[in-house]
Image: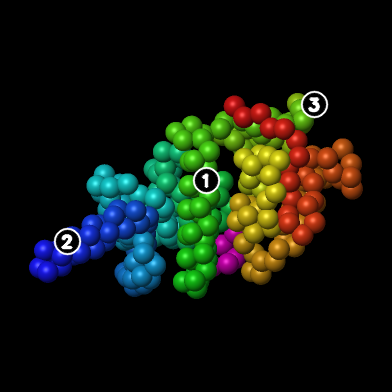
Amino acid sequence: MLAEQNTRYEEQSKGTVEQAAAAKHILVVDDDPEIREMLTNYLESENFRVSAVADSRAMSRVFNERPVDLVLLDMRLADEDGFEIMRQLGSPPEAPPIIIITGHRRDEVDRVVGLELGADDYITKPFSLRELLARVRAVLRRSGSTRQQSPGKKPKRYRFAGWELDMRMRRLRSPAGEATPLTAGEFNLLAAFLQSPQQILSREQLLAASRIHDEEVFDRSIDVQILRLRRKLEVSPSEPKLIVTERGAGYVFAAPVEVQ
């Protein structure tokens, strides 16, 4: 009887250790101790491992000690520049995905520059913990999917129908060789299509990929972005050949895509 109890205890302990090892590790960088405590308690209750620090020096120590799966970074630290910390973190695939935290919905410059520097998403204070959790899970899903598709290697360019999208320079060139400007949302949306060509992508998937986060977000925000992309890519936007609507399901990028 005692032997059976010990065996069960060992199995339960092993399961607990395995679950802890499998849990995603989130690093919170915020100089507000109340925010750090709140995020730590909430994310741990959702089965994440959490490290919370106040500055880049402590952040570096965490990176030296164990792998980090996602960073939550406050852009308005008291004594440090959030943009400089982003530069220290580097770029994927070496760097983990980053969600930046900005101080106010009207801090558009912080959001735009943060996304241009490589942030995967953003959230503004004050925010709901449920919304934060949804964004964390969405970014981790996208990050995991990208790593499975091309482990250890990030595509540098996509080519399709004579067009070329340079991922490093974030530059789109037309078949005529002319630069075609893209907003951050348009770039991310097009990249999502090119990563999954000839597959149906739902509005929810595209919404997450394009990082459209206005004061109120609706599925139709994607339709507006799709329309803008069609005007830039299609010969006849009213009769699209590249981005095709699948009624009731989402959209498909119909052209073959070459990855370099």
At label 2, counting other C-alpha atoms closer than 10 Å, the crowd grade (few under 14, some 14-19, many 20 or more) is: few
Q: Which residue is located at x 45 percent, y 38 percent?
A: 93
Q: CA distance from mark 3 to mark 2?
A: 70 Å
- The first of marks 1 and 2 along the sequence is 2
Location of the N terminus by quadrant is: bottom left
Q: Residue at x 53, y 38 (%)?
A: 149
The residue lying toward the viewer, choosing from 135 and 81, is: 135
Q: Magenta residues?
A: 103-110
**Is 222 on the left or on the right of 150, as rendered?**
right
Q: Which is closer to the viewer, label 1 or label 3?
A: 1
Q: Residue at x 27, y 59 (%)?
A: 15
Disc 3 is placed on an element classified as loop
- Left or right of 211? Residue 11 is left
Q: Is residue 228 left or right of residue 70?
A: right
- Tag 3: residue type? Ala
Badge number at residue 7? 2
Question: Could you give the CA–CA distance between mark 1 and mark 2, rounded to whole angstroms?
Answer: 37 Å
**Secondary element at tag 2:** helix
Residue designated by label 1: 145
The colour scheme is rainbow
Q: Can residue 41 be spotted in the picture?
A: yes
Taking the image as shown, residue 18 lies to the left or right of residue 185, namely: left
Earlier residue among tags 3 and 2 = 2
